[in-house]
Amino acid sequence: MTDIDTTARVVVIGGGVVGCSILYHLAKNGWSDVVLLERQELTSGSSWHAAGGLFTVVRPNASAEMHRYTFQIYRELEEVHGQHCGFHFTGGLNICRTQDEIDSNAMMQSACRRLGIEGHFISLKEAKAKAPILDTSQMIAAFWEDEGGHVDPASATNAFAGAARLLGATIHRHTPVTATNQRVDGTWDVITEKGTIHAEYVVNAAGLWGREVARMAGIELPLMPVEHQYLVTEAIPLIENLGFELPQINDNETGCYARQEGMGLLLGAYEDKMRHWAKDGTPLDFGHELLPDDLSCMEWNLERSVEIMPCLGEAGVKRVINGPMIFSPDLGPLIGPHPALRNYFCANGVMAGFNQGGGIGRVLAEWIVGGEPEIDIFNWDVARFGAFATQKYTEELTRYFYENRSEKVFPYQSFPAARPQAKSPVHDRLIEAGAVFGTGFGREHATWYAPEGTEPVDSLTYRQPNWWGPVAKEGQALRSGAGLFEFSDMAKIEVTGPNAAAWLDRIMANRLPKPGRLCLSPMLSEKGRVIGDFTISNLGDRYLIIGTYAMQLAYLRHFRRFLPVEGVTVTNLSDVLAGLALAGPNAQSIMAELSDERMETEFFRFMDAKKITLAGVKEVVALRVSYTGEAGYELYMPLDQQRKIFDALRGEGAALCGLRALMMLRLEKSYPAWGSEITSDYYAHECDMMNHVKSDKGEFIGREAVLNYGPPRERPVTLTVEVGGDAIWGDEAIFLDGSLVGYVCSGGWGPVVEKHIALGYVVPEGYREDGDYAVEILGTLRKAKLAPQPLYDPTGSRMRA
């Protein structure tokens, strides 16, 4: 006779703060038939020894929303459910020692205005009043965030657990999972020593054991445990005599954080010599143990902290906590449905569980119960990592980002760890031409080309970087002649079979193109959100779908929800086909020189898709389309043929352009980009995609939602901005007549129109052609002007020529 449940809608594996939050939010959404299994006691692993600090002013916005929601949910647990969290609402101070740190906080301040998260600079005198332990002579500025503080880890975890039980959820402690086996229908048998639970969904929230639990399901997660230390001091007289609690103190430039603990201080540090722990597997008998402490590892951090908090130098150390935490390669959580499995959700690698756990619980519950999250959370999606995220890759990246936590992240910054990654067949050609490389989804790509005599390295700045001028010249060369891009970093998915057309017609919102033609189509969720943006080509014997390279596993995950279907085969060719893109007024004549195909517009029309012979290479897929706004072609070919075509195009005078030039050129055309102006945060009618949604074509996923769209919450805008020597990067706040009305999604310099351009969104009443607009750049409002049509070739005649 078993003493545990035999069935459940959801089994959550792991009783840390994240697992308990997920259980609570599932129950809050009306699913009470949910079970949490914990191998030992709640909080075993990392939760029990966490510092519990809370802050909300972060980037990107999706992360800030997760922090904001988590901060607020502690109030709900205490006020609505009567569950004590040990919640301390103290506010938070960010220490600024350099101008770059001021700029970084100013950018976060502007970005967080979108969510109503309040943060602002205060005087050093005010900082001293809020935190009398500070020596402000070591600071040049201070940034205050209202929603800062901390919680007691054990109390917060048990508060989620207690509230979940009140709503009908079940928790079994001392019940380790020994296997997870999937049935043919996609449901799961979760096996424990006390019995087996048959569940519709499984959630892996196993913390330090996330890898081991994942392997039970036949998958590998890119996770690696590390040691992390903080110390707690004896009572400090200055604090004992305050009469109020100190705020959370963050000193990002030294990788340190501090808060009051009793009448002393808790000080944590991200050391510059991090130590991995249990690289090959977390011991199954580990629980509430700690690791040997070694304060010498944080000696530099401690010295810098004493500079601004002198009382630390005289305080005795009461205890040192050195406990393991488990990180993903970029230190962000891995959440969402695993792309290789049905009904299997991840909630792993959560570095700041007490800052993010509430939000992750909310999002996972929305995903499971409602089929999709209510906000775009791809920056934390488990699908952002593919097979390239090996153990070696994960080890190198976790080390780099941990040891460089004190470094700021600059716009377009590319990081050196685990490089080079996968390279295109013409990689050496690009190096010879002065290419500066970035990476995305495990692959190197050329971002810009350094002119002769210029070092091919990015400068790191929030203002105009060293590549500003060269990128503009690349764009000018394309618009006046022809530009060539290495274009392999695109998701390339093939759909074949006798039922391919019917299946795709259901998945996509636009009508499918006729043979030899292509179309642009969004892919919608059931609720009508935009979850994909594609070029779809009908090549006669197959369909070729082109989308964002980094999204390929997320796309395939969605496709598999509606598979298998007899007569339909979906194949990922993203790393099988190489790509090149040619654009500019001379592109047509260059193609004519190298192809057996008639390239005149009457024979190869705009939006045509053909298989051609190019530079002697047969079966090259040529698409008459360009993201630059010029006449152009996207070309896809076998990997071993890319060099031949690349050399031939270069031989005909095509100038090399990097992806940053492409992103600047598209601003002149007001073309939106996936991940910036187009995300699942928006419905199709809000991001100007309704021309590509055909609600009269018959049934397709999201059609009912489209037919019932309410008024748009926001609308896209293009602005030109007077920024002087600064730059627009994205996330800046937009003001009209002095009032906040929207935000920038992406920005840059138009190489031909020679203006600073911002693409963004404003509330409907915030759109006025003659409006007095301003964009907040590094804390200063800069005058802006609305452009009601694209700044370059507004009729689109050049791309059709």
Image: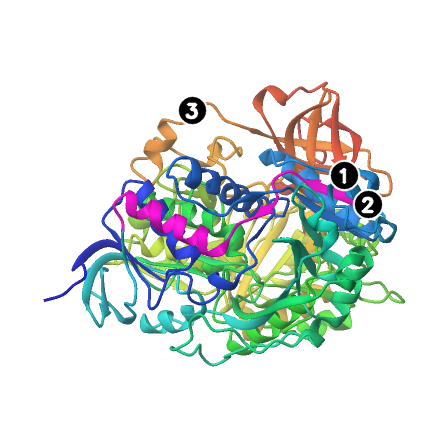
Q: Residue furthest left?
A: 1
Image quarter where the C terminus lies is: top right
Which three-letter amino acid code belongs to the residue tagged 2? Ala
Q: Which residues are magenta?
A: 141-169
Secondary structure beneath disc 1? strand
Q: Is residue 570 visible?
A: yes
Where residue 75 appears, as percent x and y from the top left, is 48, 38
Residue located 78% across and 56% down the image: 309
Q: Reply above or below: 642 against 761.
A: below
- Residue occupied by mark 1: 121
Q: Are marks 1 and 2 in contact (CB under 8 Å)?
A: yes
Q: Is residue 100 left or right of residue 714?
A: right
Residue located 61% across and 48% down the image: 626
- Residue occupied by mark 2: 141
Label 2 neighbourhood size at 10 Å, few (<14), some (14-19), many (20+)? many
Decide which of 527, 432 is in the foreground and name it: 527
Residue located 21% across and 54% down the image: 8
Q: Are marks 1 and 3 in contact (CB under 8 Å)?
A: no
Distance between the alpha carbons at the discs numbered 1 and 3 = 39 Å
Distance between the alpha carbons at the discs numbered 1 and 2 = 7 Å
